[in-house]
Image: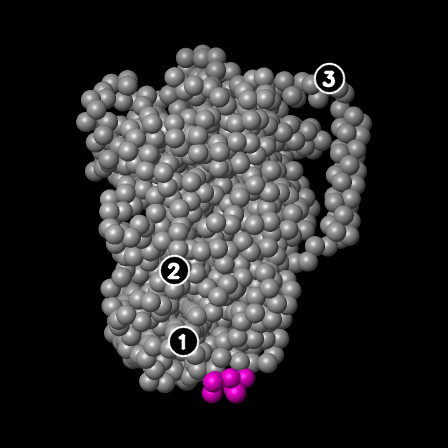
Amino acid sequence: MSRVHNAGIWLALRGNRQDLLLLPLVVLGFFTLSHAIRQMAVPFSIGQPLPISTEPNALFDDALFTTLRMLAAVLASLLFTVVYATLAAKNRYAGKILIPLLDILQSVPILGYLSITVTGFIALFPGSLVGVQLAVIFAVFTSQVWNMTFAFYQALITLPHDLDEAARLYRLNAWQRFFRLELPFAVPPLLWNTMMSMSGGWFFVVAAEAITVAGHEVMVPGIGSYIAMAIQQKDLVAIFWAILAMIVVIGLYDFLLFRPLVAWADKFKWEIGTDLQRPRSIVLEGLRRSRIAQVFARLLEALWEISLRWLPPGRPHWQDERPPTPWRDGFFSVAMVLALGLFSWHLVETLLRHFSTQEIVHVFLLGLVTGLRVFILVVLSLLVWVPVGILVGLRPGLSGRVQAVIQFLAAFPANLLFPLVVLAILRWHLNVNVWVSPLMILGSQWYVLFNVIGAAAALPSDLKEAARNLGLRGWLLWKRLLLPGTFPGTVTGGITASGGAWNASIVAEVVSWGHHTLIATGLGAYITLATAAGQLDAVALGIGVMSFYVVLVNRLFWRRLYHLAAHRLRLD
Amino acid sequence: MPTDTLPALYRLRGVSRRFANPEGAEIRVLEDVDLDLRDGEILVIVGRSGSGKSTLLRVLAGLLPASGGEVCFCGEPVRGPVAGAAMVFQSFALFPWLNVLQNVELGLEARRVPRKERRARALAAIDAIGLDGFESAFPRELSGGMRQRVGFARALVVEPQVLLMDEAFSALDVLTAETLRGDLLDLWLEHRTATRGILLVSHNIEEAVLLADRVLVFGSHPGRVRQEIAIPLPHPRDRNAEDFRALVEEIYASMTAGDGHTPLVADLPDIHRVLPAVSVNRMAGLLETLDSLGNGSQPGIRPAELARSMAFSVDDLLPLLDSLQLLGFVELVDDRVQLSAAGRRFVQGDTQERKTLFARHLLQHVPLAAHIRSVLDARSGHRAPAARFLSELEDRLPEDKARSVLETIIYWGRYAEIFAYDDRRAEFSLDDPH
């Protein structure tokens, strides 16, 4: 213990170069945080416009707020992930409810959560901006959390058998088991999914910072509201500054947060083998050498020792093998069926009370229009990016660099570019229904390219050599090797792009420049307009229908392709 | 015997282990196992893969409950992971994110041993097993042999009364395994551990004779003790000594017999017979080898000699012999393997003759093949889904075993061209692929 008590003195005496840099940074961090929190809780009531400046200087604050929102959302996501996934994995009944529920929740368009919850959050904190802040954070949270939870759950139920046995044989208690076995095993997939989530999250944080609710523009300071203001004022220069600020923020996030994390998490990789390319990070290496970080590590170690001493030892127990409980199982099934029945009946009744059949049919037709748009866009992006991805992936020197760029492009919130497209439509009087569509896929098309490059780069070299040896060339080479070989990557990319496009339709089907507003026909526009008009029933209906379509397309189309890819075209 | 006066470390009486497969049918893995692990002895259980010996080890460790009978450790009934027993795993089961020292400390951490003492004991164990210098290395930086040393250090550091080993040497190459076995034996014979008994599960017969004071031969389906063989040889033991070889052959004979003439699964209807997952190429290879060896004065060859001459382990050889016996291509006469008349014809035939012969024997001797063929013949479209046969198999076999039997029959049947199989539709048919 004395070691920790003396840490401060020890540190003061033995500081080194890294600390000279790190210490001021830490202090600066605290100041920034307190500044931001004060700003975030300013008084606010709905309908009262907040002063949003489009001066480039304001971007420093705005970028900070947007970044902190992202951070808050990701922390909330991690917390939720651990609790939800653990519950679902450890309790049989909870798992039967929570996992299908998760599947539905992740199909709901993310901005739908915002439309529904923002009024509730505002009402929760009357007279303060905190409510709106929370609503935005919640929206970003919903864009990030589901795949993280799935990843963690998946890790928990696929723990290596022998490690589980060793943990039980040595009688680790639940606490030790979590930190020694379960969490470390889950780190690589969890980190990967967190990065994917964050990358998608920028889009939603920008979209959520400025929305119209019940006829009132609700804005919280951030890059998203900055750009919304710039659009209102037709300020192209401001838009350029916002794009620049975003590029810098995403770059810093990657450099300061994710690169160090990936390099650190490398030791949790399960496959025991020697990779030639270990991820490295200058920031992490600096941290490792600094005294502050070492003291922090010692502190954690001491806490771990204390926890070992204070927590009760593990109770020996058999392998998870419960005696059959037909009564309880039966009761559970009956209760589930009753609850589902009651819920559906209630749903149908509410629907019929609030909407005419005509309106419902109309909304379903709108969904078809948006669905058609999504489908065409995904097909187009596959046609373009699959060949490009394969060509890039076959060049080992190139593929790594291109992938880094694409990761960046995927993280870049495409909605910052919307004004440019709108300008083009206005200038040349283009068909709105056609030309607004590309906006939907602007952000998510990169996932196709990214995954295809990955798959092409992983093509076994013996297959490539065999193909060359057999004299396969031209179309035959693509048909027999390149396209089937990269098919799993193509499907993964397609699924992600399609999901992203559905989500983006809510912001992409209604776009504006100054007081020109372009509205395309589709379900996304329906939801946006209903939100703006404050018709919560219609918003709920629109979101329900969209979720329905997403689930339907996933079940009938993507899941089958995925199985085909996983079982017949796997290369291992 | 002096050891009989001391109470047994483990005492098992009438232990069985069953589980229900998804179809609801009951699968027996262990049946009526009686076993004592005496104070001061090394007991080795040998059996084929799938004979339930690993399950038995997990029952002993308290990782799995027995379905019937009683399991006692030092006179106390086992009710969950046994504190006095530590296990060494075939796969090492090291935590890849912990370094050597942390891995070794894991069991002590769980026992709430204070940090200082924990470190001292772990370092001592690391020293004893020859790992000093590697304390801060991560498992992925170590070779297989070094990893298993970590496994041993982790098990021994908690000072277990009994050391359980699940095929602890079989993932290592021959030389490494030899060294590690020797080091372990030295620790044991010089009483440098607190351990009072060792129980090793293995399919390597020579390893068993090298280490054991007693060997139990395990039979399969369901797993049970078939024979007990004492190994009265003094250490160090010489593999090439006459009495050593005799014991190896005795155990080989015990494992081969019984699973030969009688069906593998005595009380199961014929189509549920467990088919060894063996490729036709390997069968052909063994037949050709037998043919070339068969020119000696005495017909046939002992399985132990055959294994040695081909550098095969039991797990390689016995399934091959089983399938060849099943198909009627080899015979076992007086513990000696020899080609049957059909086997000789197979060796002499060309590709097409071999196929025809194989097809005839498959339909004649393997009821499942005949069953599938007759279903296909009877149906007007000559098609049948694989799921149908799989669920028939699952009535009596565990899920993975049923799947493996079906895969084997698909493979054999395709070779013999008695039916075709479409993997995409998971369907049998009589289609000609051309």
Residue A479 vs B298, above or below: the answer is above
Query: Which residue position holds label 3?
Result: A358
Q: Pick the residue in front: A149 or A516.
A: A149
Q: Chain of mark 2?
A: B
Tell me how far mark 3 sits from mark 1, CA to CA. Answer: 85 Å
Q: Which image quadrant: the C terminus of chain A?
A: top left
Can you identify the residue that label 2 sits on? B252
Label 1 chain ID: B
What amino acid is found at the position of numbered circle 3 in the picture?
Answer: Gln
Pick the quarter of the image with the N terminus of chain A. bottom left
- Give the farthest residue toward the front: B297
Q: Amino acid at mark 2?
A: Tyr
Q: Which residues are magenta?
A: B1-7
As helix, strand or loop, the secondary structure at mark 2 comes to: helix
Residue annotated with mark 1: B213
Q: Nearer the viewer, mark 3 or mark 2?
A: 2
Q: Do tags 3 and 2 sit on the same chain?
A: no
A29 left or right, relative to A135:
left
Name the residue located 45 percent from the left edge and 12 percent from the top edge: A429
Task: Name the disc covering residue B240, or none.
Answer: none
Magenta stretch holds residue B192 = no
Mark 2 or 1 closer to N-term?
1
Residue B198 visible in image: yes
Residue B375's spot in the image, x, y percent? 57, 26
Mark 1 lies on a secondary structure that is loop
The answer to which quarter of the image holds residue B75 is bottom right
Mark 2 or 1: the one toward you: 2
